[in-house]
Image (tube, grey):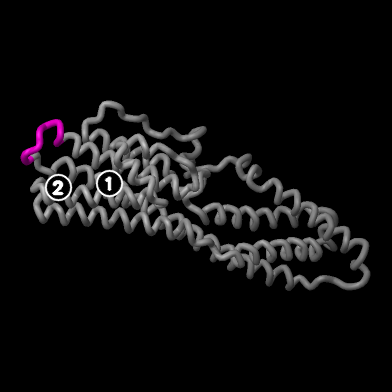
Amino acid sequence: MLIVHNIRFSRILRNTWQVDLIMIFSCTVAYLTREFLIKHNFEIPPIIPAVLGTAIAFFIGFNNNQAYDRWWEARKIWGALVNDSRSWARSVVCYISQNEKSDVEFKVIKDRMVRRHIGFLYALKAKLRGAVDENYQQYLDEADLREINLHTNVHNAILTLQSRDLQQLSKDGMIDGFRFMEMDQLLIRFSDEMGRSERIKNTVFPTTYNYLTKVFIWLFIVSLTLVISHAAGIWAIFIGWMVGFVFVSTQINGMSLIDPFENNSSSVPLNQITRTIEINLLEMIGADKIPAPVKPINNEYIL
């Protein structure tokens, strides 16, 4: 996620330089075509680029709005995970009574349930980013790992383990019925937030919207260059590219938000969010080793 208020022009060029070269080439071809093929035969009506420009504005606006909605929903989901994760750790630390357990056994139970949740977050993050992330394994014991290896959905399996242990705590009289229901509701919310994240990840943005927008932009650039060539001369190439650059940059900016869980500068900062939760939860159980917060890259964005 970008954290700066002003984007460097060099970053924009890095994202668009290939498209810029293609646009300049297209404008050059359009200019030469008018000068040597159609100049003395007919004129392109100015209404054509005007209509195309209006249509493109609607397409780009719609695409960008839908892309931002996906990004914002993803950010809200992980914001809820932050709050619910803290509530889960607080409930584990404060709601569970020692009963007949020894001090060591009591601490092991609480640590296991909190650490297991951190493993859940890392497993979910890895799945959403399509990455191989083994960080979750350090927060699970050997018995948990053996059982989880039998499942294809690791994060869902971890929630099952949490639910099973919560049920056992109720049977052992270490948690009363009301608090059991409260903690079970948290597990249900974790499952809901997990499913909503997977829905965004697995739902492909309609290809036709993005494809047709690109086609219309190229038609607009070519027709605009043809129309203004008689007045601007060779400068029509530069003007065509400049106007096209505005449309293309806006379209690319919106499309960068389509998959909010990708590991890039425009995505939701899952690394930072997960590390923040990890630090908070480890501090709540009094862990010895607390990892450092995720720092911005080049003081420009956070992953």
Can you identify the residue that label 1 sits on?
A: 85
Horizontal relation, residue 183 to residue 217: left or right: left
Write down the quadrant of residue 273 in the picture. Answer: top left
Horizontal relation, residue 6 to residue 180: left or right: right
Q: Amino acid at mark 1?
A: Ser
Circle 1 sits in a helix, a strand or a loop, which is it? Answer: helix
Residue at screen point 9% across, 39% down: 98
- Residue 65 seen in this snapshot: no
Residue at screen point 55% across, 43% down: 7
Can you identify the residue that label 2 sits on?
A: 169
Residue at screen point 34% across, 56% down: 193
**Which marked residue is nearer to the observer: mark 1 or mark 2?**
2
Horizontal relation, residue 258 to residue 181: left or right: right
Circle 2 sits in a helix, a strand or a loop, which is it? Answer: helix
Residue range corresponding to the magenta coloring? 99-106
Mark 1 touches mark 2? (CB < 8 Å)? no
Between 137 and 65, the one lying in front of the other is: 137
